[in-house]
């Protein structure tokens, strides 16, 4: 009896090893606040992103990819649990793992680990990261370094008021070489130098003699982990995820990246004067009072001309994009120079975009293209026929989880912790990878995004009808605000979304069709005009 049991165990072990050997590895790279200002997407023609462009050239680039929530926490919790924000009712910065719906669903890391993968994560992947979901979690994210007044983080002294008073996150854009000298004031002793998120001194002498920034540490940790995995330390397939902080604010990077964008030759993105006049985003915020809604005005008020302020902010944003592009290059280069390359699928995405003055707006969390459109690249070495192909069909971050599950042979595995959880909301993108020119996808014809209406989380406030939504088709964007106001843009003729066609009778059928597709996800939105309206 015993020899038979031993034989069964041995066969089981061998067979499981064969199954694991057939499964691909996965490398997920996430960046933060990166819009379409990349070489291959063309959002800003001066953007220098050779590593992103090379990855796009060797993989499939989804050029009409969008996030489902345009601010960090809900976007990430949605993507990495596979549940739409309006389904989970997790719209803001609440702990996702305490959410009534999401706590019954497996994060992507836990799902992979439960299905025979080793799961390694590092950096900014989710807010309120649950490190127990991972086999190992590396280095917590640090968006700094920051200026300090000796006690707390503050805006950079080189930046004039009123923008500096926004604070140490959004009120900072500067080269590392611009070492902050914050004078003593009141009860604060002042401080010379940079500090980390945890308040420790960040040493800077020069670009070549300094502490490493968080994204550099994340890249180094990931490359070392890939070397460890290449050495055969694990028999299981791996899921490795690295989250970079840039180009999230504070927009701080080494001087050499600022030097790549001289102010005298830098061009602003296409900005139309008074572009918000036919828009209704402000109707979500009756008093237009959330701090971030005033970032644009504070920036232009801080400099002699609006152009000067916008150019300096843009320079820092592009510098941070090129800085993080270098970190991406380190990670992808480490993979490509290893024997892991031929069995590792690479995913690269951003959590959402960011405005650089378009629509007189300087932030994320809008329902316009600058906020919703994100880089999305998938490189599958087993599908070389699709390398370098472009997909124009609208897709979104909600589709990443089911795509990874599908490509790893796990599409039949349950993403729910128990029967009270909800199934994945997205659809596998595999058909586009198999046949980029004609893949038959079973997902929607629109990408779907939400912006939360501010206010107390009453029961009504959590309901989908309380919020504002946008859908992006191949040719159009339709937006329905909680105020009942609408926007419609024809991307064939108006890629900058400068002309709102919502009241144009020639487009009534198009608007109706897009609203129907939106309400297939949200339910009826006609009973929502209950808050004061401010249209300008």
Image: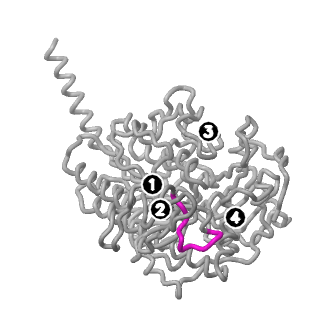
Judge whether 460 appears above or below 189 on screen: above
- Residue 339's quadrant in the figure? bottom left
Where is mark 2, residue-wise?
A: 146
SS for callout 1: loop
Direction from residue 466 to residue 396 in the image, left or right: left
Disc number for residue 197: 1
Q: Dividing the image into 4 quarters, which one contains the N terminus?
A: top left
Q: Dividing the image into 4 quarters, which one contains the C terminus?
A: bottom right
Mark 4 crowdedness (10 Å alpha carbons): few <14, some 14-19, many ≥20: some
Direction from residue 521 to residue 78 in the image, left or right: left
SS for callout 4: helix
The x and y percentages for residue 102 are: 55, 36
Where is mark 4, residue-wise?
A: 294
Where is mark 3, residue-wise?
A: 88
Q: Which residues are magenta?
A: 153-163
The mark nearer the N terminus, 2 or 4, is 2
Q: CA distance from mark 1 to mark 2?
A: 7 Å
The mark nearer the N terminus, 4 or 3, is 3
Residue occupying image coordinates x 66% and y 66%: 295
Q: CA distance from mark 3 to mark 1?
A: 30 Å
Q: CA distance from mark 1 to mark 4?
A: 25 Å
Assess whether mark 2 and mark 1 are in contact (beta carbons under 8 angstroms). Answer: yes
The mark nearer the N terminus, 1 or 4, is 1
Residue occupying image coordinates x 77% and y 65%: 279
User: Is residue 156 covered in magenta?
Assistant: yes
- Residue 356's quadrant in the figure? bottom right
The mark nearer the N terminus, 1 or 2, is 2
The x and y percentages for residue 109 are: 41, 41
């Amino acid at each position: 009896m015993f020899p038979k049991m031993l034989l069964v165990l041995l066969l089981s072990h061998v067979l499981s090893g064969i199954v694991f050997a057939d499964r691909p590895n996965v490398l997920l790279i996430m960046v933060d606040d990166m819009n379409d200002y990349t070489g291959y997407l063309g959002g800003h023609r001066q953007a220098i992103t050779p590593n992103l462009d090379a990855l796009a050239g060797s993989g499939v680039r989804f050029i009409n990819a969008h996030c489902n929530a345009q601010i960090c926490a809900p976007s990430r919790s949605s993507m990495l649990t596979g549940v739409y924000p309006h389904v989970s009712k997790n719209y803001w910065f609440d702990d996702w793992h305490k959410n009534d719906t999401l706590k019954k669903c497996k994060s992507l890391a836990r799902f992979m680990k439960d299905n025979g993968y080793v799961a390694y994560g590092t950096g900014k992947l989710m807010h309120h990261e649950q490190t127990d979901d991972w086999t190992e979690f590396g280095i917590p994210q640090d968006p700094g370094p920051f200026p300090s007044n000796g006690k707390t983080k503050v805006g950079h002294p080189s930046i004039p008021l009123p923008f500096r008073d926004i604070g140490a996150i959004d009120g900072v854009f500067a080269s590392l070489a611009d070492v902050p000298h914050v004078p003593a004031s009141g009860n604060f002793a002042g401080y010379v130098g940079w500090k980390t998120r945890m308040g420790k001194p960040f040493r800077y002498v020069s670009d070549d003699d300094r502490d490493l920034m968080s994204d550099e540490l994340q890249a180094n940790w990931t490359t070392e982990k890939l070397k460890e995995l290449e050495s055969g330390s694990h028999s299981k397939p791996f899921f490795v995820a690295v989250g970079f902080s840039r180009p999230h604010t504070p927009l701080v990077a080494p001087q050499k990246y600022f030097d790549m964008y001289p102010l005298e030759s830098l061009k602003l993105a296409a900005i139309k004067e008074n572009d918000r006049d036919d828009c209704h985003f402000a109707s979500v915020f009756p008093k237009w009072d959330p701090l971030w809604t005033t970032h644009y005005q504070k920036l232009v008020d801080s400099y002699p001309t609006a152009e000067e302020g916008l150019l300096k902010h843009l320079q820092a944003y592009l510098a941070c994009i090129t800085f993080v592009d270098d970190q991406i290059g380190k990670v992808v280069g480490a993979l490509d120079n290893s024997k892991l390359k031929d069995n590792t699928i690479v995913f690269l995405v951003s959590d959402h975009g960011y405005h650089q003055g378009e629509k007189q707006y300087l932030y994320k969390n809008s329902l316009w293209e600058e906020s919703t459109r994100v880089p999305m690249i998938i490189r599958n070495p087993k599908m070389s026929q699709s390398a370098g192909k472009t997909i124009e069909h609208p897709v979104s971050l909600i589709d990443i989880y089911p795509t990874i599950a599908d490509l790893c042979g796990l599409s039949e595995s349950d993403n729910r912790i128990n029967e009270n959880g909800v199934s994945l909301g997205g659809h596998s993108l595999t058909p586009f990878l198999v046949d980029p020119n004609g893949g038959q996808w079973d997902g929607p014809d629109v990408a779907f995004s939400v912006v939360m209406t501010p206010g107390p989380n009453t029961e009504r406030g959590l309901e989908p009808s309380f919020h504002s939504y946008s859908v992006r088709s191949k040719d159009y964007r339709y937006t329905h605000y909680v105020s009942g106001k609408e926007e419609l843009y024809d991307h064939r003729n108006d890629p900058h979304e400068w002309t709102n066609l919502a009241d144009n009778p020639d487009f009534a059928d198009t608007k109706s069709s897009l609203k129907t597709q939106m309400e297939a996800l949200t339910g009826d939105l006609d009973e929502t005009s209950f808050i004061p309206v401010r249209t300008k």
